[in-house]
Image (cartoon, rainbow, N blue to C red):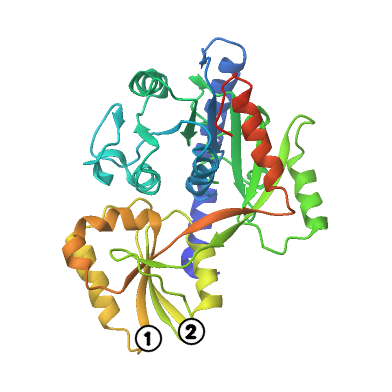
Amino acid sequence: MNFNTIFLKSFRVLLLPFAIIYGLIIMLRNWLFDKGYLRSAAFNFPLICVGNLAMGGTGKSPMVEYLVALLYPHFKVATLSRGYKRKTQGYALANESTTALDIGDEPMLFHLKFPKVAVAVGEERIVAIPHLLQDIPDLQAVILDDAFQHRVVRAGFNIILTEYNNLYTHDFFLPTGDLRDEWASARRAQVIIVTKCPIDLSEEKKQQLIQDINPKTTQRVFFTAIEYGVPYHINSQQLRNITNSDTVLLVCGIANPRPLKEYLLQQAYTYYQKDFSDHHIFSIDDLNEIKERFDSIDAEKKFILTTEKDAVRLTKFSEEIKDLPLYVLPIRPRFLFGEAEEFNKMIFSFIRHFSFNPTT
């Protein structure tokens, strides 16, 4: 543990009084919703919510992608996100001319990967959902990205994610910890997924984690690991494997890059890093710094690697990056213990409950 980490943790402990106040406000708000003093709107429509109790880094975007890939061959689905750090406001539906500045990097990623799926953004879900249903009248399900704590809309199926190395049961309220919601809120979910687990997670450790989470009898706990794909060039889409003779410059602006760095330690000869803040909007100066850092690396086999979320914010420099060895690393969640089929069946069953007739 380096000095910066120790200092940050010590500083956050000093903020405990603010965390307690924040926690009390959150608990009061939840109590008001639970008792009906604050109203939640329920739509007679399949809404699947993917969220968490902590700030970022639990793997919501890959899980939304997983659900879209699972569902869109059989149902007409859409995604609805807040559109964090976009330059627009209000409801917007992605089209052919949309950019990450219009809808945010994560929705843009969904739009690029699933061009036939409706991708919408809107800060107020209760306003955006009717807009979306009006724009796409034959929709059969909507996936709400990062909406669990926004209780004005009540989804029919809630999935919350918690990271293996930072379970919400071991966390505390912001700013001392990372929690933006209380532990008890997890009991509103139908499914709890422990993400970023070791690929060789043992049955014994699995049972310990379930005991720690202490789910209701009606809840199901699943476990996923990160599955990395083969990097592809940001422009040409040409594939390039990472070998133990490669030197990699990692460029990323994501909430929790630790698993990615651990992966590179295993796969590459060595790696350097150029970190940016989460959802960072890259400028031409940033790109020049990346180029300078890459040129300064003394190695024969070297290339730049970034995440898919970062890549959508770099594609605006198409001319500047066309000759760069800049590759994108895709990821997806991998369900452990052979339980993917059980999870999939739960999702299909929820949508079919609304009497739709998917093409299966």
Residue sitting at x 50%, y 73%: 264
Proximity of marks 1 and 2: CB atoms separated by less than 8 Å: yes
Mark 2 residue crowding within 10 angstroms, few (<14) / some (14–19) / many (20+): some
Question: Which element carries disc 2, helix, strand or loop?
Answer: loop
Residue sitting at x 50%, y 64%: 229
Location of the N terminus by quadrant is bottom right
Give me the disc on residue 269. Answer: 2
Tell whether 218 sits left or right of 97: right
Quarter of the image holding residue 350? top right
Residue sitting at x 27%, y 70%: 290
Question: Which element carries disc 1, helix, strand or loop?
Answer: loop
Q: What type is the residue that disc 2 sits on?
A: Tyr
Q: Is residue 8 above or below residue 155?
A: below
Residue 335 percent location from the top left of the image: 66, 52
Q: In this view, does 202 lie above or below 178?
A: below
Residue 91 percent location from the top left of the image: 30, 26
Front one among 314 and 173: 314
Q: Distance between the residues labelled 1 and 2?
A: 10 Å
Residue 274 percent location from the top left of the image: 35, 69
Find disc 1 in the rendering and name its residue: 301
Q: What type is the residue that disc 1 sits on?
A: Lys
Front one among 229 and 275: 229
Q: In this view, does 101 lie above or below 48?
A: below
